[in-house]
Structure formats: structure tokens, C-alpha cells
Image (cartoon, grey):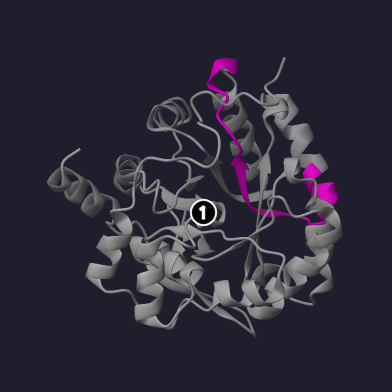
């Protein structure tokens, strides 16, 4: 792809798909966006992928104390119960913490989805969910559309506020939209400076789908990249803060994770500085289409029998 073409795609992907608002509680005000269903989601969340159950309560408790108001978990992470406990024990009103979990691949299909949702909610110990995502499309199973229809039923029943997907390609999104009549509010995808996915982000922008980044730091592989380190030195920030700020200025929702209290706090301190256009461009040129996670086109772990 030429630099000119990539620039045009990035411009399209950067088009704003929701109003800037603030997700407020008594103790934190997090910049947020309005989703295509009118609901509000913080631009920065706290993820618990590869956080053990033993670590999860302390990590989520620390994140909430620092000021995070969006917590992202999944059935397959094995820590929904601990995440729910930390949220309940935080003392924060339920409507001041945005909670996301994800349906695992083995539970796709209409009826199986309804059962899996009940199980997740029992583990979380919550009476409603802010956002439910299909974790992976598992396209060969042919079940993700019926799964999304089950999501619609749960939303209509008032048990989920918003419904979305994760790791979906343009083709998967087009089919869901065409066959269910509803556009997912979010597509959570692997996204970092070495995998910027401009074409998919442009599709999201054109259809009012928020882009949410998992592995926003490239699982740490970018923290010693010379281009990132240079911008960190220029701004007096850490490499992780620079990358997270890059995400926010692109319009992405970022979901970093850590179990180290100082890093949890550092990753949240990204709202009081800005990167220049030149710094943004230098970071974006690191894109090589390189994944650190599975390819959604071929990933089938846990696929239904």
C-alpha cells in the first residue's frame, strides 16, 4: 500500500463516530465516547487477560482505586468471579463501573449462548452487563449470526445494555449487520503500532462501530522500539504511556492490562498530554501487519463440535 493510500484510509478511520463525553463517578472522570446505541463507554479500560484468579481481585481493586471505570474480562480468562468480587467490594455504585465480558467459542449458538450468559452473570455476581462480546467469529462453525441474535434477545430483556463482537473481520461484520439488522457497537481487535489495521478501522468508522484495542502495547514487544523510546524521551512519558496516548488520539478504545500497581497507575495517566502530528506519524509508520495473537481467519480453539 502506498503512503498516500494509507494516509487516506487513516483519515477515514479517524472520523469520529460518537460524541466526546466524560464517564463520571464521584471519584473519577474518564474521557469516553457515545456508542451507536447511545450508551457511553470509557476510552480507557482495564483488561485481565492472563491475570490469574489469585491476582485478579487485587489488580481490579487497584485499577478502580486509580480511576479506571471500565473492566474487561471473558469467560475463558477464568477470572470472572474475582473481577465481580472486586467490583462489588469497591463500594462504587454499579452504574459507575462499565463491565464487559465475552462469550467463549464453545458456547456459540442461540441456546448455548443464553446458558453461557447466565453462567457468566452468576460468576460475576452482577444483575446486568454493560457490554457482551462474541470473543471470536469461528466462521467455519457458522454460528456467530445466531449467537448475535441471542445477544439481541438478552438486550431486549434488559440483561445487557450493549452488544458487540471481538476479532471480527469486515466480512464477518457485514454478515452480522445484513442478517440481524443491527450493527455491533464495538469490535475489539488486536491493534497496536505494528498492527494498525487501517482498512478495518475505516470500515468501523463508516458504520459507527467503535474500535477497541486488545494487546494495545503489543504484549510489551514495542516498549523498547527506538521510535517509541524517542517519543517517550521527547514527552517525558513512559513508552507505554506514549503508545496508549497514540491509541486515544486515533479514536481507539484501549484495554491495557497489568498486575503491577505502579504500571496500572502509569497506564491511566495518559489524559494530560498530547502527541504532535509528527509523533503520531512516526509511531504509525511502525505498522508491519505483525500479529502477536491468533489470526481471526484461522483461529478455531474451542470451536463447537
- Residue 84 in view of the camera: no
Q: Is residue 230 left or right of residue 2?
A: right
Count of numbered circles in the view: 1
- Residue 183 in view of the camera: yes
Badge 1 density bin: few <14, some 14–19, many ≥20, Cα 10 Å: few
Residue 240 location, x and y as percent? Answer: 50, 67
Seen in the picture, residue 18 relative to 74 is either above or below; the reply is below
Residue 200 sits in which quadrant? top left
Viewer-closest of 293 and 74:
293
Q: Which residues are magenta?
A: 120-141
Viewer-closest of 290 and 175:
290
Seen in the picture, residue 217 relative to 238 is either above or below; the reply is above
Residue at horizontal 45%, vertical 56%? 35
Quadrant (top left/top right/bottom left/bottom right) for the N terminus: top left
Residue 178 location, x and y as percent? Answer: 40, 27
Asked if residue 136 is among those painted magenta in the image, a careful observer would answer yes
Asked if residue 94 is among those painted magenta in the image, a careful observer would answer no
Residue 72 location, x and y as percent? Answer: 65, 55
Q: Is residue 93 left or right of residue 169?
A: right
Q: Is residue 11 left or right of residue 64?
A: left
Residue 84 sits in which quadrant? bottom right
Residue at horizontal 62%, vertical 70%? 69
Viewer-closest of 231 and 178:
231
Quadrant (top left/top right/bottom left/bottom right) for the C terminus: top right
Q: Is residue 200 left or right of residue 79?
A: left
Seen in the picture, residue 79 relative to 110 is either above or below; the reply is below
Residue 190 location, x and y as percent? Answer: 49, 45
Residue 63 sits in which quadrant? bottom right
Residue at horizontal 59%, vertical 38%? 152
Helix or strand or loop: what does disc 1 sit on? Answer: loop
Q: In the rendered image, which residue does mark 1 sit on?
A: 221
Amino acid at each position: 500500500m502506498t503512503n498516500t493510500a494509507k494516509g487516506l484510509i487513516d483519515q477515514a478511520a479517524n472520523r469520529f463516530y460518537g460524541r466526546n463525553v466524560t464517564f463520571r463517578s464521584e471519584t473519577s472522570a474518564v474521557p469516553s465516547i457515545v456508542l451507536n446505541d447511545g450508551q457511553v463507554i470509557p476510552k480507557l479500560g482495564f483488561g485481565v487477560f492472563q491475570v490469574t484468579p489469585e491476582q485478579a481481585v487485587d489488580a481490579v481493586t487497584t485499577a478502580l482505586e486509580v480511576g479506571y471505570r471500565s473492566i474487561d474480562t471473558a469467560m475463558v480468562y477464568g477470572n470472572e468471579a474475582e473481577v465481580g468480587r472486586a467490583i462489588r467490594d469497591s463500594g462504587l455504585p454499579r452504574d459507575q463501573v462499565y463491565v464487559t465480558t465475552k462469550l467463549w467459542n464453545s458456547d456459540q449458538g442461540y441456546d448455548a449462548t443464553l446458558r453461557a450468559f447466565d453462567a457468566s452473570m452468576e460468576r460475576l455476581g452482577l444483575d446486568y452487563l454493560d457490554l457482551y462480546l462474541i470473543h471470536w467469529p469461528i466462521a467455519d462453525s457458522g454460528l456467530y449470526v445466531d449467537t448475535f441474535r441471542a445477544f439481541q434477545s438478552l438486550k431486549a430483556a434488559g440483561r445487557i445494555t450493549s452488544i458487540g463482537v471481538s476479532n471480527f473481520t469486515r466480512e464477518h461484520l457485514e454478515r452480522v449487520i445484513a442478517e440481524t439488522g443491527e450493527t455491533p457497537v464495538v469490535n475489539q481487535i488486536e491493534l497496536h503500532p505494528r498492527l494498525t489495521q487501517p482498512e478495518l478501522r475505516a470500515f468501523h468508522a463508516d458504520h459507527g462501530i467503535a474500535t477497541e484495542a486488545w494487546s494495545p502495547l503489543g504484549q510489551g514487544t514495542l516498549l523498547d522500539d527506538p521510535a517509541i523510546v524517542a517519543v517517550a524521551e521527547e514527552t517525558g512519558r513512559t513508552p507505554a504511556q506514549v503508545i496508549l496516548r497514540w491509541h486515544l488520539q486515533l479514536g481507539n478504545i484501549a484495554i491495557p492490562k497489568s498486575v503491577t500497581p505502579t504500571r496500572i497507575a502509569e497506564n491511566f495517566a495518559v489524559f494530560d498530554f498530547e502527541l504532535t502530528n509528527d509523533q503520531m506519524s512516526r509511531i504509525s509508520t511502525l505498522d508491519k501487519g505483525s500479529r502477536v495473537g491468533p489470526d481471526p481467519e484461522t483461529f478455531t480453539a474451542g470451536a463447537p463440535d
